[in-house]
Amino acid sequence: MPPKLALFICVIYVFLLLRLERKQTPNVSWVLWIPTAWMLVIAGKPLSIWFGSGDRDEGSPLDQIFLISVFCLGVCILTSRRINLSRTIKENIPLMLLIGYTLLSVFWSEIPFITFKRWTREVIAVVMALLVLSEKEPRQAMLSLLKRNIYILIPFSIILIKYFPEYGIQYRWNGGQMWIGVTLQKNGLGRLCMIAAFFLVWTFVRRWHRKDIPVDKRQKLADLSVLILTLFMLSGPGGQYSATALISFSAGLLIFVGLLWTKKNQIFPGANTLMVFLTVIFSLGTLQPFLGGALIKSASSELGRDDTLTGRTEIWAGLLPDIMQRPFFGYGFASYWTETRRGIHEIGEAHSGYFEVLLDHGLIGLLLILIFLLSSCRKAQRELRHDFDWACLWICFLVMTTIHNYTESSLSSFTTQLPAILLFLAVSSVIPILSVTSNSSTSNYPTKMVTSRSRRLPIKPPRTKIHAMSTTQNSKLCQFIDKKS
């Protein structure tokens, strides 16, 4: 098939998928396309690669124009929707502490101006999350955002791999192929497929339990076709797949099945059980680069990888002296990988999210990230009794993120896909209290239950005055009733 014809068919296929998604979520406004577009950009290649070029440190003008545009649009819309920002900040104090600490790191960065520019991207990520929160149904908007990203990125990745290999395939030094699709590298495509596969499986289970919005057969077949394409890309060509993504996906499914079993048997985890479990995973992930990957070498050999974890142990050994030079504060937010250090190490990332955090934020930053994850885990655990499906999605993404960062770097910034999803899940679970005018009627006022920390509180409609009848009016009413009877 000619590449242009295949691309045209793919565009039609994606259009039909998005049309089905739109019919399923009529309450979602057009504003959701702003954070959706932002998520599409951070999940795939930068705009500079598709349409131009730019400096790696300074960034490209095209990407900067896009980020400034979505930021300005987001701020304007949030101002018009009058979201209660103080309440949102109060519900996300660990997140605010983390954002504030990354701003402070500008002062000890070797490239302060570039560091500040990169920090503003974290603020843009928070604004995108607040746009989801400002929707009429934030949780439904969050699910719609994930679906749109999957419906667009997965089919186009297949097309690039099959018909446009100059964009969709990379080659190893020995000539072996590595599928990258719309992403920058093999592991980026693996992460995208891991997220898509788990979300689609979660969606199918939710429909099976009849907890989702009823859909027709076309929607089910569409989701099934996308899931098949996702699993096909996750397997990779000739064994060249992302082992980290596959392990993380398997762990997410295992946790999901375990949570379903606890619900079936009416056994809910204790108050701190999941938090302790997440802390153990996080601690082991932090320790294993210092131990030369000894904790995961057995799993690596089972998946056909060598004892060096494809060269990762050598990278960690080379980075360890730099970590020990600035153990508490690091080198500043997104400041370690300068052009000089990339030339020395001949690589641009630590291939460990925990090592990456130690390089940029130090031990203090690592502790703040752990506090943010534990805060999210605590909120998700409380949701198990009220919105079980949402809590399962949240908990499984927390576990997959912490495991995925054992050998990949996607924990130090909210401008990568996995942390961005955790940010959106955390923020979209806050009560979106908006300003209500005095003319609001009871019929239009929301009365459904919403979550507020450890309890579920109904939003009560405003009280209306009830005028008492006088004695004369009361006697006349009684006479009228007697006549009728």
Image (cartoon, rainbow, N blue to C red):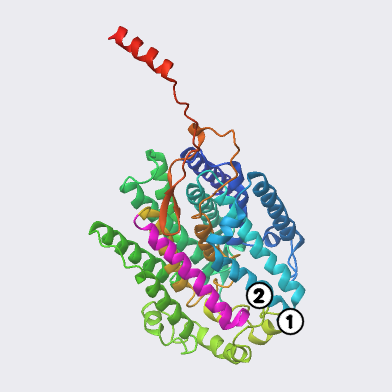
Question: Which residues are drawn in magenta?
Answer: 356-385
Q: Position of residue 411 (x, y in %)?
A: 54, 72
Question: Residue 157's quadrant in the figure?
Answer: bottom right
Query: Is 128 one of the magenta-colored residues?
Result: no
| Helix, strand or loop for disc 2 | loop
Using the rendered image of the protein, determine whether residue 352 is visible from the camera's viewpoint.
no
Q: Which residue is mark 1?
A: 110
Please report the residue visible at 39 percent of the width from the left and 76 percent of the height from the top. Answer: 303
Residue linked to disc 2: 334
The quadrant where residue 184 appears? bottom right
Q: In the displayed structure, does residue 330 sit left or right of residue 60?
A: left
Which residue type carries mark 1?
Answer: Glu
Image quarter of the C terminus: top left
Based on the picture, tell me whether residue 366 belongs to the magenta stretch.
yes
**Residue 376 pos. (x, y %):** 47, 65
Q: Callout 1: 10 Å neighbours few (<14), some, many (20+)? A: some
